Amino acid sequence: VNQFSSKFDAYTRKQVDLSPIEKQGLTLFNGKAKCDKCHESDSKGKVPALFTDFGYENIGLPTNIDFLNPMNRNNAPTDFGLGAELINSQNPAWKALAVQNMGKFRTPTVRNVAKGENNKRFMHNGALKSLEEVVHFYNTRDTDPSWRSPEVTLNMEKSDVGDLGLSKKEELAIVAFLRTLSDGWSSSGSNRQSTL
């Protein structure tokens, strides 16, 4: 599904340079923001960076109350992710893994995450409405009281999400970098990614 024709891919081939804010975002992505812990940004041999480790994590997303019936918001169904699939398995070995996987979802690639971002919902349940909100959530899940409590607290990722200490400018730099991951970039400017 990936053409590997993004500005980031051209950058890794040394065909173009990233803007200062995009470079700062890449540095933060691979450092202070810890994004690369799950969204691996290194190529593997001849395979370009896929920006996923194909693992499963529970990052503590709140329930998406916007998609629920307004009359039933207090009784929202809980999505237990991989754990729910395993608990219903006919295979006893898989069923035994259910509890330790409750609330976990596959780590998606962040390639092309910015495509169509103006009409998009983000995360497995659509709870976040913009890339800016996604990065802010990862940064402040544990420090900003305005976030609703997590849908599933069991098995929640504690070390790489929630209190990253990023400034607003650093959050925006990461968003600028994420926009370099969209396929179809052209150095001619017709498909050039917008930066902040």
Image (cartoon, rainbow, N blue to C red):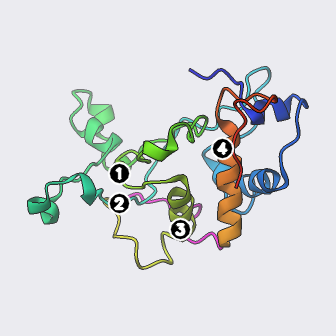
Q: CA distance from mark 4 to mark 3?
A: 22 Å
Give, as a three-letter code, the residue at label 4. Answer: Arg
**Image point 65% across, 71% down: which residue?**
168
Image x and y of residue 9, in percent: 77, 30
Q: CA distance from mark 1 to mark 4?
A: 28 Å
Frontmost residue, 27 versus 185:
185
Q: CB of mark 2 within 8 Å of CB of mark 1?
A: yes
Q: Earlier in the sequence, mark 2 or mark 1?
A: 1
Q: Which residue is mark 2?
A: 154
Which region is colored magenta?
Answer: 154-165
Q: Earlier in the sequence, mark 4 or mark 3?
A: 3
Local SS, label 3: loop
Q: CA distance from mark 4 to mark 2?
A: 32 Å
**Image point 51% across, 44% down: which residue?**
117
Q: CB of mark 4 within 8 Å of CB of mark 3?
A: no
In the depicted structure, whether residue 105 falls above or below residue 9: below
Q: Earlier in the sequence, mark 1 or mark 3?
A: 1
Residue 129 painted magenta: no
The reply to whether residue 120 is in sight is yes
Image x and y of residue 112, in percent: 59, 35
Q: Which residue is mark 1?
A: 103
Q: CA distance from mark 3 to mark 2?
A: 15 Å
Residue 179's disc number: 4
